[in-house]
Every structure is written in C-alpha cells, then in structure tokens.
Amino acid sequence: ETMILAGEIGLAIIAAAYMAPIPAALTEMFPRNIRVSAVSVGYNLAYAIFGGTVPMVAVWLIKKEHDDLAFVWYIIAAGVISLIVALSLHRQIKNQLPD
C-alpha cells in the first residue's frame, strides 16, 4: 500500500507540474479582445476531438494489432505532436502579451 500511495503522489506531482502553466500559456496565445472565446473554443475542441476519440482509437488499435500495448504508439505520437507545438509556441508568444 505504501508503494501505491507513493506512486499516486508522484503522478500527482508530475500532473501538477505540466498542468499548472496551461492557463498562462493559453492566455498569452491570443489578443485581449478575443482571449476568452479563443481559449474556450481551442481548449474544449481539443478535448472533444482527442478525448472523445481515444476509446475508439484504443479499441481499434488493440484489435488491429492484437496487442494490448498497441495504443502506446498513439500516446507517443500525441506526445511528440504536443512537444513540437509547445516548442513552437514558446518562440511565438515570448513577448506577445500586451497587457
């Protein structure tokens, strides 16, 4: 039980580390006059598309490959795409926030 608790605490720390800067990054991406709409549409659309299709993609990959770990490649691809976007946004929004 101690190892499970330690693992959960570790995952909570990791999740907090990558989720904490999301609001600041999202607000810095858009000008003030469209910020709320743009952030809400972008954030929720991404969750609807990727979060909504994940179960279907997981089942399809597992059945197609006959391997329970086939879905890992989907997660790795999503991580690589996210890393590329995050690195490009860092350069793009470095000094863009006017207020």
Image (cartoon, grey):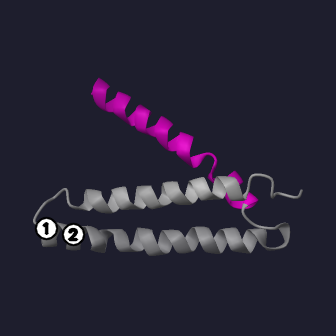
Answer whether residue 93 is visible to the viewer in this image: yes
What amino acid type is highlighted by mark number 1? Answer: Glu
Q: Residue furthest left?
A: 66
68 lies left or right of 54: left
| Badge 2 element | helix
Residue matched to label 2 = 61
The x, y position of residue 19, in whole percent, is 56, 48
Tag 2–tag 1 contact (CB < 8 Å)? yes
Residue matched to label 1 = 65
Magenta residues, start to end: 1-28
Quarter location, residue 75: bottom left
Q: Residue at x 80, y 58 (%)?
A: 96
Q: Main secondary structure of the magenta part?
A: helix
- Crowd around label 2: few <14 · some 14–19 · many ≥20 (10 Å): some
The x, y position of residue 11, in whole percent, is 42, 38
The x, y position of residue 31, in whole percent, is 81, 68
